[in-house]
Amino acid sequence: MTLSSSSTHDNPPPFTSPSTSITAATPSWLPQHKPAKQRMALSLKNLMGSMLGGGSAKQDIKPSSSELFAKTDPKVDGEECLHDCENCSVRYPRGFKIEEEDVLYGLVEPWSTHLLVGTGKTDWVRDVADEKGSVMEAFSKATEPANGKLKLSASNMPTPHDTDDYSEPTTLLLLPAFKLIQNVHPLSVPQIVTEVVNRAPTSTSPLHPTPLPASLPSPDPAAGIPGVSLKDCPHNAVILMCSHRTRDVRCAQSAPILRKEFERQLRPLGLYRDLHDERPGGVGIYYISHVGGHKYSANVMIYRRPNAFGLDDPVPEQQNGTNGVEKNGNGSNGSAEESVGASQGIWLARVMPEDCENLIRYTVLRGKVVKPERQLRGGFDRGRGVMSW
């Protein structure tokens, strides 16, 4: 299976419904060597979109995988990018099988913001919105954000009192803003949507500083519910991995194995940060709930600040939009006036333990993708104004 970054148009024959004359070809930005089953499903989806749009659906214009994120090149990055880790000490259990044939790139639904809710747990009910009394449930019932789709994830992020009791306030991580929202109660959620999420940077917004309130008042002082406070996340990058056993046991099997290997790679660099480590910089690693596509486990999402570790390839100032702010990811992280949030969100799948060394070396540290043909599902680069949707 290969992904093509060229502009060839050797599309497979379009699917034609026997009851209509509308023809739906596979979008040209997708790689063309797809399994027949997937090709049929994509063509049918495209056909239905055309029909629902009155037969006048516009042609999708999306970047190829190599246009979205740079692929490692041994001439630039060294021969190491061609080889998996040889001394990896962990493996998935025997019988760990995933789907290997489907094309992954460009098929994820767009998202504007991503919100992680600290629960102190690694598994949840099938739909986290059904966790009774939780902040997740409150968000599912709140008004939808005005700035696009909010991806909501339960997370193993610790709560302020290190409990999984939903009656206690918790902590949220809002991405790509890289903002921690603290002392959150379900009753605080409507105000967080209107005053924080709606004002926050999104996956499609330019890399400009976006001031957000430092605090929000209590929604019910008489009941002893605290006010909400905001601060910058101290990390330069975060790695998110699905661990949702209730949805698929493979996610629960893969997440702790990958975490162990990521930690092994990050510790010698001084970049590993455990759940309670708030030292500036480094890489935070969190488990999250189902994101879709568990048959492609392990799903890994990486959010990076602009030039997070000072190793990205040079980008002209006028193109990256940072205006010299936070170019090395350290900047003045605590300053709301200077933080621009994450510049990249990179969604990978089919990640194996032997991939972790190069995933840290090139993707986390440099913003490049090693195996886009096999692993890249999608994402965004705010600095260059491109996304996979």
Image (cartoon, helix red, strand yellow):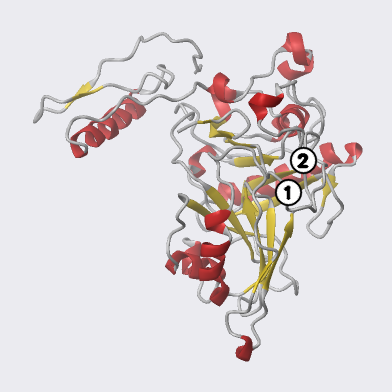
Look at label 1 and name its amino acid: Ile
Crowding at dot 2, Cα within 10 Å, few <14 / some 14-19 / many 20+, comes out as many
* Marks 2/1: CA–CA distance: 9 Å
Sooner in the amino-acid sequence: mark 2 or mark 1:
2
Residue drawn at the location 68% of the way across and 44% of the way down: 340
Look at label 2 and name its amino acid: Phe
Residue 345, horizontal then vertical, whole percent: 61, 38
Residue drawn at the location 71% of the way across and 42% of the way down: 258
Residue 128, horizontal then vertical, whole percent: 51, 63
Q: Are marks 2 and 1 in contact (CB under 8 Å)?
A: yes
Can you tell which mark lies on residue 250? none
Secondary structure state at the residue bearing disc 2: helix
Q: Nearer the viewer, residue 96 or 68?
A: 68
Residue 167, horizontal then vertical, whole percent: 61, 80
Q: Is residue 335 visible?
A: yes
Residue named by callout 2: 262
Q: Quadrant of the C terminus?
A: top left
Q: Is residue 368 visible?
A: no
Can you tell which mark lies on residue 285? 1
Residue 319: quarter of image: top right
Residue drawn at the location 62% of the way across and 46% of the way down: 176
Q: Is residue 230 left or right of residue 386?
A: right
